[in-house]
Image: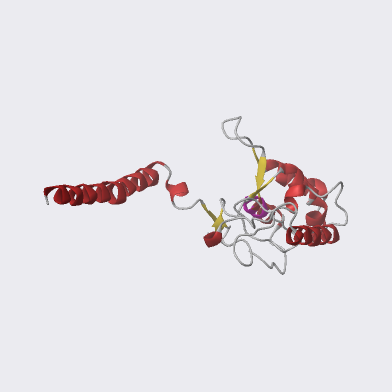
Amino acid sequence: MQDFIIAIRTTLVTLVVTGLLYPLATTGVALLIFPRQARGSLVMNAKGETVGSELIAQPFANAAYLSSRPSAAGEKGYDATSSGGSNLGPSSKALHDRASKDLAQLLSDNPQAVGPVPVELVSASASGLDPHLSPAAAFWQVPRIAHARGVSEERVRTVIEAQIESRDFLLLGEPRVNVLLTNLALDRLFGRPPQVANQ
């Protein structure tokens, strides 16, 4: 009986310390030191409205915006509550068919693009929610964006160049472009395009 009481007491103390006190302490420290990140790195538009998180991808169907990577997160993709890949292997017919369809659509939507389609524009990330593109994938979309906005390609390229994020701590990861932040920068400079389907 004494062993049972000790076990119950140990369980309760462990539960309170690791399940209550520790999470509250770490959340409090995070809110104090990194308040924006602890609240989800939310992004506001020019009107002060929350339009997303810089950490979570979302779809952009309007030709005047950078397109995100494909997403297998959730039934329709880009579902932040269902993060994950498709788990389809390289020999999967379903993956091949989906990538072929996406490739055909990209080539149709970007007839003036120069060079081959960057692979990340037809491949989903492991989470399905990667908010970034490589600079090469962003620049590949410049002709379509410039045409849709009625501005020169050089001006669109300049906006993208200004949005390139360098490696973390100068050595981790690769240079990248945040799709949401870049699209907001395009709106700030050139105005919001008509008939925006997704934002």
Q: Is the magenta stretch mostly helix, strand or loop?
A: helix
Residue 159 image offset from top left, x and y in percent: 71, 46
Residue 62 image offset from top left, x and y in percent: 73, 63
State which quadrant residue 65 falls in: bottom right
Which part of the image, by quadrant, shows the C terminus? Answer: bottom right
Residue 44 image offset from top left, x and y in percent: 54, 56
Left or right of 36 on screen, residue 156: right
Q: How many labels does the image show?
A: 0
Q: Is residue 70 magenta?
A: no
Boundaries of the magenta span = 180-184
Name the foreground residue: 62 vs 109. 109
Name the foreground residue: 7 vs 26. 7
Residue 44 lies, with reference to residue 155, above or below; the image says below
Farthest front residue in view = 1
* Residue 49 appearing in the image: no
Q: Residue at x 60, y 54 (%)?
A: 129
Residue 111 image offset from top left, x and y in percent: 87, 57
Farthest left residue in view = 2
* Residue 21 appearing in the image: yes
Q: Which residue is drawn at 42% across and 47% down?
A: 35
Name the foreground residue: 147 vs 79. 79
Left or right of 14 on screen, residue 81: right
Give the colour scheme of this rendering: secondary structure
Q: Which residue is drawn at 39% across and 44% down?
A: 30
Q: Residue at x 66, y 65 (%)?
A: 198
